[in-house]
Amino acid sequence: MQKILITGGTGFAGTHLLKALQKRDTEDEIHLTSLHEHQLPGVQVHALNLIDAAAVEKLIQDIQPDQIYHLASLAGVADSFKDPQTVINNNFQLTLNVLEAVRKFAPQAKILLISSAEIYKPNLEGRPIAEDGLLEPSNPYAASKAAQDLLASAYGQSFNLNIVRARPFNHIGPGQNKGFVVADFASQIAAIEKDDQIHEIKVGNLKAARDFTDVDDMMRAYILLMEKGARGEVYNIGRGQAIKIQAILDQLLALAHKKIDVIIDQERLRPIDIPTIVADNRKIAALGWQAEVPLEETLAHILEDWRDKMV
Ligand code: GDD
């Protein structure tokens, strides 16, 4: 029996991770943190803000977790240009609090720290980036994730903690909030289908290319890394294929029930946008992981989910 703690357990990734852990049918005791109270079957939900250091220490001391999936973070790149200070303070402080609490009260715990592909120096030829790529964040969100990643590296080495860092590339699925490209596109399409008055979808930069993985494939990778990831190591997680945002839009529009015009919305263009981000995923592939859900399936699933929400 393992005591498992998920920080940010009611967020987009956390919700899918919880489902995957519960499917395993083990005797594990699962705890999660959330900003708000929730009643969830088979789980202990702890409502707290992780930027409260004393509350985090008490939580870790009380639970004594064996495994911690540290997911909690503000995750939007676009939002981070609007309020950099909040994103950086929040992401840095809550990670420092978790690491400090583990150092003091649960130094035996294995931590999976969720970093990001955004922290790498971009490869301008669009080649896949491996784990030894240079770090060169280009937006406030990326800086906050680099800070988390480096804090985890320092705490692992300084205090002999068992930390594995995951660097996920883009992941998508039902339940993701607006503010991320596929949710933004699919939510608008579902709304346009229901409203005779609107025929236009607003989009940002369609020229960028990203490496998209279904969130459930991503959560399978997290669980694998918790089981088999080597202490102190870093693992990229991504399908390993770049797809242009234009192609994502085209696929979603092809699924739409009516003809939709595309409008470039200046508000959605970023001060800086990495042209291509694609994973060199050989390291996690060597542990037996690969993306399984086809992108078309994930996109259709997300659009259906937004249609259901419109009812
Ligand atoms: N959000 C958004 N909304 N993005 C748009 C839109 C739009 O209407 N139109 C075009 N884009 C473009 C963005 O400019 C970017 O090039 C691309 O679509 C993807 O944007 P996001 O979905 O916001 O994701 P991201 O690549 O910036 O960051 C995601 O991936 C990281 C890992 O690679 C996030 O999930 C991060 O949390 C994650 O760390």
Image (cartoon, helix red, strand yellow):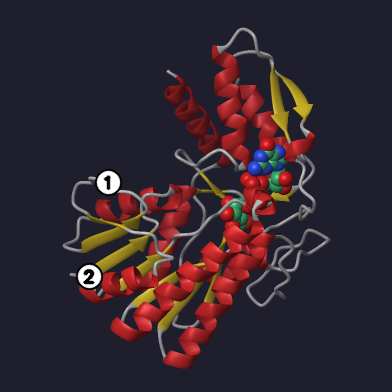
Q: Residue 43: which quarter of the image?
A: bottom left
Q: Residue at x 62, y 29 (%)?
A: 252
How packed mark 1 is, by other alpha carbons closer than 10 Å (few <14, some 14-19, many 20 or more), is some
Looking at the rendered structure, the number of numbered marks drawn on it comes to: 2
Q: Residue at x 60, y 38 (%)?
A: 182
Image coordinates of residue 139 in percent, x first then y, are 71, 60
Left-right relation of 175 to 77: left
Q: Nearer the viewer, residue 204 or 255?
A: 204
Residue beneath label 1, please? Answer: 38
Q: Is residue 152 above or below residue 3?
A: below
Q: Secondary structure at mark 2?
A: loop
Image coordinates of residue 22 in percent, x first then y, are 25, 53
Image coordinates of residue 302 in percent, x first then y, are 50, 34
Mark nearer the N terminus (2 vs 1): 2
Image coordinates of residue 197 in percent, x first then y, are 64, 9
Q: Residue 98: which quarter of the image?
A: bottom left
Q: Residue at x 45, y 39 (%)?
A: 175
Q: Is mark 2 within 8 Å of ligand 1?
A: no
- In the picture, the quarter occupied by the N terminus is bottom left
Q: Residue 278: which quarter of the image?
A: bottom right
Residue beneath label 2, please? Answer: 2
Left-right relation of 16 to 154: left
- In the picture, the quarter occupied by the C terminus is top left
Q: Secondary structure at mark 1?
A: loop
Q: Is residue 302 above or below residue 34?
A: above
The three-letter code of the residue at mark 1 reads His
Numbered tag placed on residue 250 in the rendering? none
How packed mark 2 is, by other alpha carbons closer than 10 Å (few <14, some 14-19, many 20 or more), is few
Q: How far apart, in angstroms, are the residues tagged by discs 2 and 1?
A: 22 Å
Q: Is residue 66 visible?
A: no
The three-letter code of the residue at mark 2 reads Gln
Left-right relation of 193 to 139: left
